[in-house]
Image (cartoon, rainbow, N blue to C red):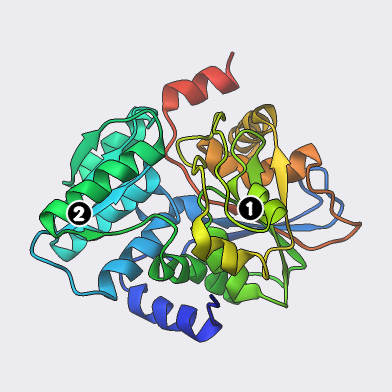
Amino acid sequence: MTIIRAEIEAAHARIAPHVRRTPVLHQNRAFGHDGPVSLKLEFLQHAGSFKTRGAFNALLSQELPSAGVAAASGGNHGAAVAYAASQLGVKARIFVPEISSPAKIAVIRSHGAEVVIGGARYADAQEACDRFVAESGALRIHPFAAESTMIGQGTAALEWEQDGPALDTVLVAVGGGGLISGVASWWAGRVKVVGVEPEGSRALHAALAAGGPVDVEIDSVAADSLGAKNTGDLVYEVCRGTVDHVALVTDAAIRDAQRTLWRDYRIASEPGGAAALAALISGAYMPRSGERIGVLLCGANVELQKLAELVHP
């Protein structure tokens, strides 16, 4: 499978009236790097994450049944689908696992969607969602393994290139891989795209090493957003030719990145949203001197009490 830039441009025109054009912050000599660093502040998107782009593109590019839409999510995708559905006047039912944070569940409910909580992991929620879709005729909006979702997420890279300085490398957090599929498709052959996954949740890293999608065990502080156990075929096919490699970060590095974002920028980031920055801060990705680095900060749906305990132990 190949996603071309024209498809991302068309998606951007389609969703632009519904999404925020999130800002880009440019810095020099930041986070221990001696060169320029560009931060795409996608956590400022509606519903708190980049997922809103893919949700709107999916809903606006398909015929919507009277039964509405359904999605399985660790939290952010569900919030995005709930928000998009509410704006378009569509019913939404969101299935989330028991590990989903109360903060994310609250965001989903705030947009009027029905929430069904059950199962220990994301895969359990997806199975429940699939059963509901089969029974009801609702349209399934997959969080990553769908072409419309990937293309929608790629619009973040389109804006980044238009609004920011030229980049050599971008760091992108990976859960199921929808975001990096879109971003890497936009910059294919022009900018190096590096995925970032927690050591305890490495579905894309494992797929690229194995030559195809494989199941992985999930055990990470970022599991509610970066906790897919398998990328699926679509993500693998896109990423194997467009992603340079995947850097792995520890949970400790992710927490350190959260602290840094709060301390220095007053950015309240969820673990998954700070993972890409964790690769730069921890040295999991080591840029060459002067390399022009981009970091996508992708999610802000954090439990404030947990963040407070993290930054003020």
Q: Is residue 36 above or below residue 298?
A: below
Q: Is residue 37 above or below residue 112?
A: below
Query: Which mark is on residue 241?
Result: none
Classify 10 Å Cα crowding around label 1: few (below 14), some (14-19), many (20 and above): many
Q: Which residue shows up at 56% across the image and 29% down it?
A: 219
Tag 2, which secondary structure? helix
Residue 250 location (% of width, % of height) = 69, 32
Alpha-carbon span between mark 1 and mark 2: 28 Å
Classify 10 Å Cα crowding around label 2: few (below 14), some (14-19), many (20 and above): some
Tag 1, which secondary structure? helix
Residue 307 location (% of width, % of height) = 50, 25
Question: Is 252 on the left or on the right of 147, as rendered?
Answer: right
Q: Which residue shows up at 57% across the image and 21% down it?
A: 310
Hey, what amino acid is under mark 2?
A: Val
The answer to which image quadrant residue 260 occupies is top right
- The answer to whether residue 23 shows anywhere in this view is no
Q: Which residue shows up at 18% across the image and 55% down it?
A: 134
Q: Quadrant of the C terminus?
A: top right
Question: Is 133 on the left or on the right of 16, as rendered?
Answer: left
Q: Which residue is mark 2?
A: 133
Q: Earlier in the sequence, mark 1 or mark 2?
A: 2
Q: Which residue shows up at 38% across the image and 30% down it?
A: 101
Question: Is 116 on the left or on the right of 28, as rendered?
Answer: left
The answer to which image quadrant residue 283 occupies is top right
Residue 124 location (% of width, % of height) = 35, 37
Figure label count: 2
Query: Which mark is on residue 207?
Result: 1
Is residue 177 or residue 159 the one in the foreground?
177
Q: Are marks 1 and 2 in contact (CB under 8 Å)?
A: no
